[in-house]
Image (spheres, grey):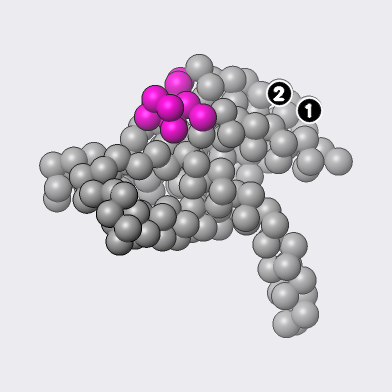
Amino acid sequence: MHELIIYTAILTIIAAATLFDLNRHIIPNQLIIVGLALWIILFVIGWLDGPEDMAAGVAAGSLLLGIRWLGEFFFSKKGMGMGDIKLLFLIGLYLGWQVFWFLYLAIIIGGLWALAGLVLKKLQRTSRIAFAPFLFVGMCLGLTLLPFHMIWQWWMR
């Protein structure tokens, strides 16, 4: 039962971040702070694993921070917004190492979206694309596919 509350909490935060990111191209720090406060509550009552989840959050956030720095170094443009980095860190806090499965899906979906936009001439190479919506879609898709992945692993034993 508590997994449902955890997934609902982080999905709600990502949905709010998606709306802000689509409309203003920014994810407010207040939203991240609310997510951190809720995480602390869930950790204190024993529903989340603090050290393991913190390691996953830091690793995921560091990966996106590296992408941001590389984009700035090679292209003189930041490859990722700080709000996306903080949001992915927060997702890692809630979901642990599963965050990389959702990030993988978000990158694939975002890449396909950008490619389609370029081919259809709806986007240009310099267009800014909000990443939070792809994190949201990637997480929803990942949560849908995760049970099938678990069944597949069980079957292959």
- Quadrant of res 85: top left
Tell me the SS state at disc 1. loop
Nearer to us in this view, 62 or 9 = 9
- Quadrant of res 10: top right
Give the residue pinned by disc 2: 41
Residue pictured at 34% horizontal, 35% vertical: 81
Mark 1 surroundings within 10 Å by alpha-carbon count, few (fewer than 14), some (14 through 19), many (20 or more) = few
Q: Is residue 146 left or right of residue 33?
A: right
Tell me the SS state at disc 2. helix
- Tell me the distance, in whole angstroms, between the alpha carbons under discs 2 and 1: 6 Å
Residue pictured at 53% horizontal, 22% vertical: 31
Classify 10 as above or below 31.
below
Q: Are marks 2 and 1 in contact (CB under 8 Å)?
A: yes
Which region of the structure is painted magenta?
A: 19-29
Q: Is residue 1 left or right of residue 43?
A: right
Mark 2 surroundings within 10 Å by alpha-carbon count, few (fewer than 14), some (14 through 19), many (20 or more) = few
Q: Position of residue 92 (x, y in %)?
A: 55, 42
User: Which quarter of the figure is the N terminus placed in?
Assistant: top right
Give the residue pinned by disc 1: 45
Q: Position of residue 40 (x, y in %)?
A: 65, 25
Residue pictured at 35% horizontal, 42% vertical: 129
Which amino acid lies under the numbered mark 1 shown in the image of this protein?
Ile
Q: Is residue 140 left or right of residue 75?
A: right
Q: Is residue 144 left or right of residue 83?
A: right
Q: Position of residue 110 (x, y in %)?
A: 42, 53
Q: Position of residue 36 (x, y in %)?
A: 58, 25
Q: Residue 155: within the magenta?
A: no
Does the rendering let one see residue 31? yes
Which amino acid lies under the numbered mark 2 shown in the image of this protein?
Ile
